[in-house]
Image (cartoon, rainbow, N blue to C red):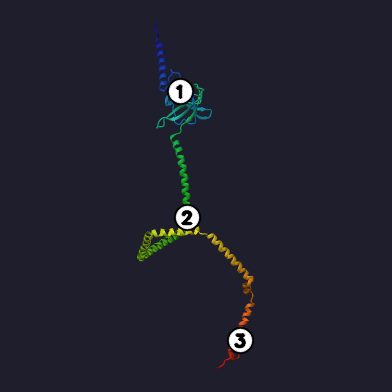
Amino acid sequence: MKLSKEFKIGVIVIISLALLYWGFNFLKGENIFSKERIFLAVYKDVSGLNKANAVIINGLNVGHVRDMYFSGNGDSRVLVEMILNDPIPIPKNSVAKIISSDLLGSKTVEILLGSSSEIAVSGDTLNSEIEASIKEEVNRQLQPLKNKAEGLLTSIDTILTMLNGLFNKSNMDNVSKSVAHMANTFENIESTTDNLDEIITQQRGRIEMIIKNIEAISANLKNNEGNLDNILTNFASISDTLSKAKLSQTVHNLQNTLNQLSLITERINSGQGSIGMLVNDDSLYIELKKSSRDLNILLEDIRQNPKKYLKFSVF
C-alpha cells in the first residue's frame, strides 16, 4: 500500500508537534510520561518566587513551581501551583514554605512534612509559610539592641539634664567655694605636717631618750621576770590565805559590835543610865559653873584679905 504524500506530511507534523510539546514541557521541568501530582498553596507575598523554581523535601528536589497567579474575586493573595514528580506521601497538615536557596536571593519552595495520618491528594491546598528575609531577620535580631540603645539614650539624656541642673551658676559657686575650702584644708594639713616634722626634729633627742628608757624598763622587766613571778606567787598565796581565813565570821562580829555601839549611843542620847543623864541633864553643868564662880570669889577674897584666912606666928 502506497502512502500518499499528504499522509506522510501529516504524520511528520503530528510527530513534530508531539516532540515540540514534550520538549517544551521538558524545558519547564515537566515529564509528560510520569505520574505527576499538583499541590496548591496561597501566599500574601511570593517574595521573588518564579515559575520553574524547585520544590524540595528534606533537601531533595521533588518537583517545581508550574504557575503563579492571583486567586481572583478581588483577593490579592497569590496562588502557587506546584508539581511533584516524587511519589512520597504528603500529609494533610504539611506546610509549603518559601525559603531562600542561596545568598543571591533565589527562592525555593520547601515542603515541611506534617504528622497527620491523612494523606493529601493531587489538587489539595497545603498550608503556606514564608521564611523571614535577611533584612527582617537582621531587624529582628537588632530590635533588642535598638530598644536597649533607646533606653540608654533616654538615661543619658536624663543624666545630662540632671548635670545641667547641677552645674548651674549657684551650684558652681558652691562647688568653687568647696574646692577653695578643700585647698585651704590641704594647706592646713601640710602646715600641720611641717610643724610635726619640726617638733619631731627638735625633740629627736628626747624621743630617743624616751625610747631608751622604755627599752631599759623592758630589759628590767625581762631581767626581773623571776622576781615578778615570785611576787605574783606571793600575791596568790596571800589571796589563798585570805580566802581560807574566817573573814565572814570576823565581819559578822564587827557588825554585831557596831550594832551594840549604835544601841549604846542611842541609849545615851535618850538619857538612859548615868552617862545619859550626865550628857543630857544640864543641871550638873549649872552646878559646876556656880561652884567655879564661888571658888573664884573665894580665891579673890583670900588674895585681898589673906590675914582673914591665914594666921602667922613668929618665934
Q: Which mark is residue 30?
A: none
Residue under numbered circle 2: 166
Residue under numbered circle 3: 298
The residue under the point 62% across, 82% down is 291
Count residues near mark 3 (Cα–Cα under 10 Å), then give few for <14, some for 14-19, many for 20+: few
Q: Kindly state the secondary structure of the residue where label 1 is placed.
A: strand
State the CA–CA distance, disc 1 to disc 2.
73 Å
Q: Kindly state the secondary structure of the residue where label 3 is placed.
A: helix
Residue under numbered circle 1: 83
Classify residue 105 by image quadrant: top left
- Tell me how many marks there are: 3
Count residues near mark 1 (Cα–Cα under 10 Å), then give few for <14, some for 14-19, many for 20+: many
Residue 260 appears in the picture as rendered: yes
Outermost residue, bottom direction?
Answer: 315
Classify residue 7 by image quadrant: top left
State the CA–CA distance, disc 3 to disc 1.
172 Å
Identified by mark 1, the residue type is Ile
Left or right: 202 with respect to 298?
A: left
Which of disc 1 and disc 3 is earlier in sequence?
1
Q: Position of residue 144 (x, y in %)?
A: 46, 40
Between 102 and 217, the one nearer to me in the picture: 217
The residue under the point 63% across, 69% down is 267
Count residues near mark 2 (Cα–Cα under 10 Å), then give few for <14, some for 14-19, many for 20+: few
Q: Is residue 297 above or below residue 276?
A: below
